């Protein structure tokens, strides 16, 4: 199997207009996941700056971020840590709220999810306004992690997501 490029992955991403509400162009990654070569290739590209053992934990954001982060964790011989929507994690948590177009959202991490000083890679499927990733990065600072990179399969560059993540190395495979 030849190694897929980011362009190959881009071709498989399905645009679904007006989901989950009118005006949103939803980027559906399920065709990437369903294709063994593209799924493995996306994990190779998301982790290409790191050798196994150089990362303590890969952190994934609820819910599609889990898929990529868990696979990346196995590849890097690192642990997997979930950042979840408020109310889902069973143990003690830190919470972080961020603004949405209408209202706010809150995400959480277990207080003992990583040891202070841990080297972590944060992954989500898509960077839009950056609120979600910035809140996740804030939670990681709170537990004392060192965020090595924040990676996305997809970036919507017409939104100011990167502005919210200043100070962190950001990588995205497919940019719209
Ligand atoms: P944001 O906080 O605005 O950067 O939004 C990022 C989060 O919302 C990610 O976890 C994405 O899964 C999801 N998301 C936002 N916009 C889209 C979109 N157009 N297509 C698919 N997922 C999206």
Image: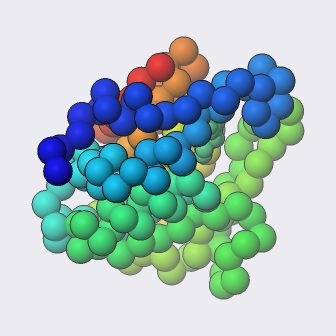
Asked whether residue 154 is in view, the answer is yes
Q: Is residue 170 above or below residue 72?
A: above
Residue 45 picture quarter: top left
Residue closest to the far bottom: 91
Q: Position of residue 11 (x, y in %)?
A: 41, 28
Left/right of residue 107 with respect to residue 135 in the rendered view? right
Q: Nearer the viewer, residue 6 or 105?
A: 6
In the picture, measured across the screen, residue 1 lies left or right of residue 109, that is left
> For the point 74% across and 54% down, which residue is it?
106
Q: Residue at left 39%, top 51%?
A: 35
In the displayed structure, 84 sits above or below 135; it is: below
Of 60 and 68, nearer the camera is 68
Q: Position of residue 46 (x, y in %)?
A: 30, 47
Q: Residue at x 80, y 43 (%)?
A: 104
Name the foreground residue: 58 vs 138: 58
Residue 98 % position (x, y): 71, 43
């Amino acid at each position: 199997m030849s190694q897929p490029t980011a362009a190959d992955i881009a071709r498989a991403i399905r645009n679904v207009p007006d989901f989950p509400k009118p005006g949103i162009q939803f980027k559906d990654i399920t065709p990437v996941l369903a294709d063994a070569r593209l799924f493995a290739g996306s994990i190779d590209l998301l982790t290409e700056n790191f050798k196994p053992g150089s990362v303590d934990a890969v952190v994934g954001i609820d819910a599609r971020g889990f898929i990529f982060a868990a696979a990346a964790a196995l590849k890097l011989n690192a642990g997997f840590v979930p950042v979840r929507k408020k109310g889902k994690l069973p143990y003690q948590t830190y919470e972080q709220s961020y603004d949405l177009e209408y209202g706010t959202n809150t995400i959480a991490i277990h207080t003992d999810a990583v040891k202070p000083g841990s080297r972590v890679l944060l992954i989500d499927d898509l960077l839009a306004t950056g609120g979600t990733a910035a809140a996740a990065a804030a939670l990681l600072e709170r537990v004392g992690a060192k965020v090595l990179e924040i990676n996305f399969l997809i970036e919507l560059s017409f939104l100011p997501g990167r502005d919210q993540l200043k100070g962190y190395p950001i990588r995205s495979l497919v940019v719209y």
